């Protein structure tokens, strides 16, 4: 196999080494050649092609710098427009993504010395919106594409047209209402003086606000809507009054003893409800994953309660002692027929026997001194 064969080990190794980004110090921008090490870069600088390229650049160095600057600016803005659109983004994020391309133009070949200078230049030229923050410079692309501008104008025109349609509809409805009111003569109230024939007679006023309001509303409705609408309003008022009277009659019915007991139990539960439930000598389960798989979903016994919300627990299997918050623990419900303790509600702190468990409603029924209760937080006693 020849020395310069494409499949020779040396050729394969050279291709593997040349993949990806190389060091910037061994890159020649004029020749656009990347060398792998210092010796290769030295040999390239002494080559005839490099010397010839330097002679061309020395004749008009500003032309080459302008060319590289324009290429760098176009590629950077194209990446910003295509990748981030008009979103506000940190300039270093865009630059890191730009230099990840192997054939990119290096900034040291342009007219800008640093990324900050380039960002300020973009702001001065009006190509991007730039702002400085404690975290660095942020840029936002200004899209001046004719197609984008045309699309925005169309959206504004459509929004304005929708508003005009709404105004036209509102004016049409207003005209219809005005026409309907013009054909009917509204009765004007007649005001008279208060005359009292007998000076000793007492003057009485009826201050029933609801009745006067309903009478005024009914008279106004009858004058505008007509007799049919008046009948409908009177029927609705009668139904409402009948429903109100029937509701009052139902409330006046005597409650049974069972209803009173249930109300007392509910009131007791509501008053005795607390946001803490830890009790000594109960079995709990650790639900937090921050302690690792060794303690996750393992059972423990509460040995001490600190400040109502923190407990010192002892692991059942290993005997280790841990100090945990109640948010990292949950209660353990035993099988029916075993002893449990009520941790919250009206019977808080009492022990009883678990009778049944309703998994669909997330509740349980326990017996405490021959009294059956439901919907309470329980655990092993």
Image (tube, grey):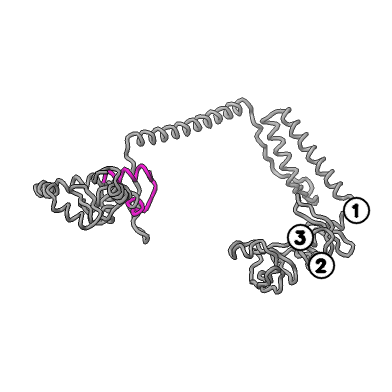
Circle 2 or circle 3, nearest the eye: 3
User: CA–CA distance between discs 2 and 1?
Assistant: 28 Å
Residue 14 locus on image (x, y percent): 28, 49
Picture quarter with the N terminus? top left
User: CA–CA distance between discs 3 and 1?
Assistant: 34 Å
- Identify the residue at image location x=30%, y=48%: 9
Q: Earlier in the sequence, mark 2 or mark 1?
A: 1
Tell me the residue that label 1 is attached to.
256
The reply to whether the C-beta atoms of the residues labelled 2 and 1 are less than 8 Å apart is no
Is residue 27 positioned above or below 71 on the image? below
**Which mark is drawn over residue 333?**
3
**Which mark is drawn over residue 350?**
2
Residue 157 locus on image (x, y percent): 41, 33
User: CA–CA distance between discs 2 and 3?
Assistant: 15 Å
- The magenta stretch is 73-95
**Does dot 1 land on a helix, a strand or a loop?**
loop
Q: Earlier in the sequence, mark 3 or mark 1?
A: 1
């Amino acid at each position: 196999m020849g020395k310069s064969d494409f499949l020779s080990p040396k050729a394969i190794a050279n291709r593997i080494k040349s993949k990806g980004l190389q060091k910037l110090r061994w890159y020649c921008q004029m020749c656009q050649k990347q060398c792998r090490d210092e010796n290769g870069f030295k040999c390239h600088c002494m080559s005839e092609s490099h010397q010839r390229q330097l002679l061309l650049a020395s004749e008009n160095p500003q032309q080459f710098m302008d060319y590289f600057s324009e290429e760098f600016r176009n590629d950077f803005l194209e990446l910003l427009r295509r990748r981030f659109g008009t979103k506000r983004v940190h300039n270093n994020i865009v630059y890191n993504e730009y230099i990840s391309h192997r054939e990119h133009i290096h900034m040291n070949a342009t007219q800008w010395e640093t990324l900050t200078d380039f960002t300020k230049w973009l702001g001065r030229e009006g190509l991007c919106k730039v702002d400085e923050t404690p975290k660095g410079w942020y840029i936002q692309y200004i899209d001046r594409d004719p197609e984008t501008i045309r699309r925005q104008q169309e959206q504004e025109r459509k929004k304005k047209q929708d508003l005009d349609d709404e105004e036209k509809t509102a004016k049409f409805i207003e005209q219809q209402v005005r026409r309907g009111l013009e054909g009917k003569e509204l009765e004007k109230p007649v005001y008279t003086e208060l005359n009292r024939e007998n000076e000793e007679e007492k003057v009485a006023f009826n201050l029933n606000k609801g009745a006067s309001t309903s009478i005024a509303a009914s008279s106004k409705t009858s004058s505008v809507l007509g007799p049919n609408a008046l009948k409908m309003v009177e029927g609705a008022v009668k139904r409402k009054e009948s429903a109100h009277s029937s509701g009052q009659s139902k409330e006046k019915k005597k409650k049974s003893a069972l209803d009173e007991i249930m109300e007392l139990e509910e009131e007791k539960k509501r008053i005795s409800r607390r946001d803490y439930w830890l009790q000594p000598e109960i079995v709990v389960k650790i639900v937090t994953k921050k302690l690792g798989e060794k303690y996750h979903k393992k059972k423990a016994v509460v040995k001490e309660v600190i400040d109502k919300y923190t407990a010192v627990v002892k692991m059942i299997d290993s005997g280790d002692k841990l100090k945990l918050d109640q948010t990292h623990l949950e209660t353990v419900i035993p099988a029916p027929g075993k002893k449990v303790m009520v941790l919250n509600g009206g019977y808080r702190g009492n022990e009883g026997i678990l009778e049944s468990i309703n998994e669909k409603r997330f509740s349980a029924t326990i017996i405490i001194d021959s009294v059956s209760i439901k919907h309470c937080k329980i655990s092993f006693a």
